[in-house]
Amino acid sequence: MIVYNLRCKNSHEFEGWFKDSAAFDAQAQGGRLTCPVCDTGKVEKAIMAPAVSGAKKSMATADESKKMRQFMTGLRKYVQDNADYVGPKFAEEARKIHYGEVEDRHIYGEATLQEAKELVEEGVDVAPLPPDLDGAN
């Protein structure tokens, strides 16, 4: 897995997790990246600063934690609002989409760890949905 800092055309910054740099390139070229704040599809890699130790580490950590929580909450909401819930049939539906047996669409649901590993081994683009940190859903 690789993490990139991303920025949309409206200057919202967020992180994106990808299997590898090729996965990022494919999603970017395919127009499948969207900002979790404003939903724009104009997203690019942002400049990444190296981590530097310092006296303000605890303050930065709290700030980063808040940003990560907001990002995860926004990402979860975006997926729930824009994808079909397929429940425990996630692995089956993801394969059908991957192999062109059904119309391409965004889905989410449940899969066992073994099912998720098998999907990744088959080259199916999957990612875990961030947990519901607010307990709303």
Image (cartoon, grey):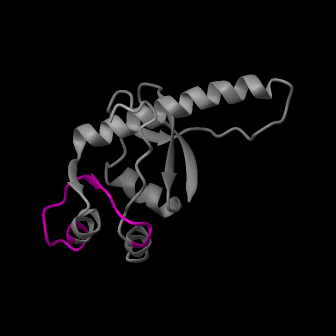
Count numbered badges in the picture: 0
Above or below, comparing residue 1 to residue 31 in the picture: below
At 63% from the left and 30% from the top, the residue drawn is: 64
Depth order, front residue of 130/102: 130
Name the spot of residue 132 as percent of width and height, x first: 41, 38
The verdict on residue 65 being magenta is no
Can you see residue 42?
no
Name the image quarter holding residue 56: top right
Name the spot of residue 89 as percent of width and height, x first: 23, 64
At 86% from the left and 25% from the top, the residue drawn is: 55
Name the spot of residue 105 as percent of width and height, x first: 20, 55
The verdict on residue 99 being magenta is yes
Residue sitting farthest toward the right: 55
Can you see residue 132?
yes
Q: What residue span does the magenta drawing correspond to?
A: 96-114
Describe residue 85's horizontal placement relative to residue 64 as left or right. Answer: left
At 50% from the left and 51% from the top, the residue drawn is: 17
Describe residue 55's horizontal placement relative to residue 134 as left or right. Answer: right
Name the image quarter holding residue 23: bottom left
Above or below, comparing residue 89 to residue 86 in the picture: below
Name the spot of residue 35 as percent of width and height, x first: 39, 35
Depth order, front residue of 43/136: 136
Quadrant containing the N terminus in the rendered view: bottom right
Residue sitting farthest toward the front: 135
At 61% from the left and 31% from the top, the residue drawn is: 65
Depth order, front residue of 74/48: 74
Residue sitting farthest toward the left: 102
Quadrant containing the C terminus in the rendered view: top left
